[in-house]
Image (tube, rainbow, N blue to C red):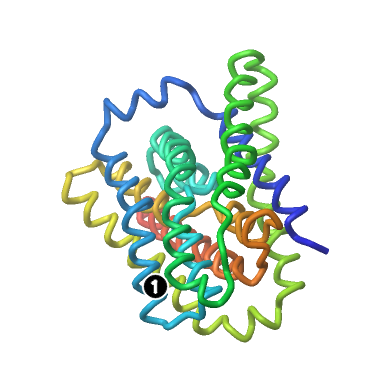
Amino acid sequence: MNTIWIVLPILTLLMFDLGLSLRLEDFGKVFRHPWPIAVALTGQLVLLPLIALGLAYLFRLPPVFFIGLVLIACCPGGSSSNVFSKLGGGDVALSVTLTALSSIITLFTIPVVMSWTTRLVGESVGIVLPVGNLIKQNLVLMLLPVLLGIVLHYAWPKAADKTDKVLSKLAFPLLLVLITIFYLQHHRTILDNIGLLGLCVTVLILVAITCSSLLSRLVKNSLQQRRTVVIEVGMQNAAQAIAIASSPFIFANEEMAIPAILYSLMMNIVLLTYVFVIRQKAGR
């Protein structure tokens, strides 16, 4: 079974659900609360890819995993970050805005960063990136579903709310299904590389959220905002990375998606631990 035919509808549903939860006035927060947004976007769109690039060199990853690691680091925030922000006492409205903004901005940044990365380490081993196909796929699977969700929200708000309640509950289980299927198909490759890659992605997550938290403190964000920044920077849209890596129109390489799979597992472990510690402290 080719996992691309599973990941494409999952990614589309996740982005459609993001559109359902968006309000146009959410984007006004960019001007009312510029520092939390600037810190989170800097952490997610600048620090995370740079740290991934450095770690890929440090761990001497083979080209396919090197590109895959940078790819997951370049992706926007995951839709589950909104749920994690709520559980962790963060600013949920800020989280929704950040997920939307990063999803839009990365439509332009992913082709640039991945084109450069592929030329750097991929072309020598036959890995090429059809940039035009990448842009087209992202527009169809990312931007279009978000816009449709926004239109549905304003045209039929009650139906949009009911649909959002269902899809938001399905997001995490669907991702688990995708990871399980992917693992069953590639378990040997994953097990052979889990030590190196597992450590690499864990260090990537921990360093990125630590730097973002320190930067957030530096600009004196509120406690709620700092928690949201940490969660938003750490949680990436793994479904998008898997879709780009395994798409027959782009890289057509399922091994390249393995860093995204491991990142997805480790980000949930790290951030669930983070939320658990917060709730334990709140309970005391």
Residue 49 drawn above or below residue 27: below
Residue 158 in picture, x, y percent from top left: 66, 17
Q: Which residue is mark 1?
A: 203
Residue 83 drawn above or below residue 190: above
Q: Choose between 245 and 264: the one closer to the eye.
A: 245
Residue 131 in picture, x, y percent from top left: 54, 51
Q: Quadrant of the C terminus?
A: bottom left
Residue 84 in picture, x, y percent from top left: 49, 48
Does residue 226 appear to the left or right of 141 in the view shown?
Answer: left
- Secondary element under disc 1, as helix, strand or loop, is helix
Circle 1 crowding by C-alpha within 10 Å: few under 14, some 14–19, many from 20: some
Q: Choose between 203 and 223: the one closer to the eye.
A: 203
Q: Quadrant of the N terminus?
A: bottom right
Q: Residue at image x 37%, y 59%? A: 48
Q: Residue at image x 40%, y 60%? A: 277
Does residue 212 appear to the left or right of 182 in the view shown?
Answer: left
Residue 51 drawn above or below residue 74: below
Mark 1 residue type: Val
Total number of numbered labels? Answer: 1
Residue at the top extreme of this rendering: 155
Please identify the quarter of the rendering in which residue 19 is found: top right
Please identify the quarter of the rendering in which residue 257 is found: bottom right
Q: Residue at image x 66%, y 15%? A: 156
Residue 10 in picture, x, y percent from top left: 70, 47
